[in-house]
Image (cartoon, grey):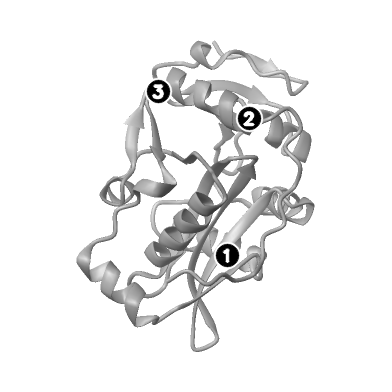
Amino acid sequence: MIPWLTEPDFPPTERALTEPNGLLAAGGALTPEWLLAAYRRGIFPWFSEGEPILWWSPDPRMILRPGEVKVSRSLGKTLRQGRFEVRYDTAFAEVIHACGQLRAQSTGTWITPHMELAYRRLHELGHAHSVETWQDGRLVGGLYGVALDRAFFGESMFSLVSDASKVALVHLCRRLERLGFGVIDCQMATDHLRSMGGVDVPRAQFVRALDRLIGPKSPPQRWPASDDIG
């Protein structure tokens, strides 16, 4: 059995179920208070329309260290060609909506309208960010996630043209490395993220890393809309 939460006081992550892997608790709300309390403990919400809010902390956990992103030869060529313009935080609502729409068309999505509103609120507060790839004035790919001090929690990405989301991820890694971030949480392991440098680590190791990387207050971070990295 998992606990039903009425306050953002999450149980220790080691109490999460092994089957399904990482299910820790249910209930609560998707307010900034709940979401930020969860992320700083290595917990995230993931549930489908019609279900209660479910909170997860899988073991092992896939992470990507910003300085260790893998760039294939073909992706490196795309980056050098400058086929995309990369922007930050200029179209957050459009990015999260596109992520939800594409997933709904394939395997289904957890990015419900309620989730969209919750993360748009985090973005307005300066805690959630988007990385966007543009081509000929059109948004063609990107990703979004939550930043707390020196940890970034990736939520979802989308791509309408080849390499668009990969370019966004590489630019994110380079910016985070410059800012001194220590980890990108990938949440769920995928072959795509593994090919770009994602590695599995024990959940306990991940949670200890968050203790080092996230301070007690985690003020909002305002990111410039562009940078000069290649």
Please name the residue shown 22% across and 70% down the image. 74
Question: Is residue 102 depicted above or below 20 in this figure?
Answer: below
Nearest the camera: 127 or 159? 127
Residue carrying label 1: 95
Local secondary structure at mark 1: helix
* Residue closer to the observer: 41 or 140: 41
Say the numbered circle drawn on residue 59: 3
Percent coordinates x, y for residue 196 in the rendering: 31, 52
| Residue situated furthest bottom in the rendering | 136
Q: How packed is label 1: few (under 14 Cα within 10 Å), some, or many (20 or more)?
A: many
The kind of residue tagged 2 is Arg
Q: Residue at x 33, y 32 (%)?
A: 200
Q: CA distance from mark 2 to mark 3?
A: 16 Å
Instruction: Tell me residue 132's x, y (percent).
Output: 54, 68
Q: Separation of disc 3 and disc 1 at Cα?
A: 28 Å
Mark 2 or 3, which is nearer the eye? 2
Q: Please tell me which of labels 2 and 3 falls first in the chain.
A: 2
- The secondary element bearing badge 3 is classed as loop
Q: Secondary structure at mark 2?
A: loop
Please state which amino acid type lies under the numbered disc 3.
Asp
The N terminus lies in quadrant: top right
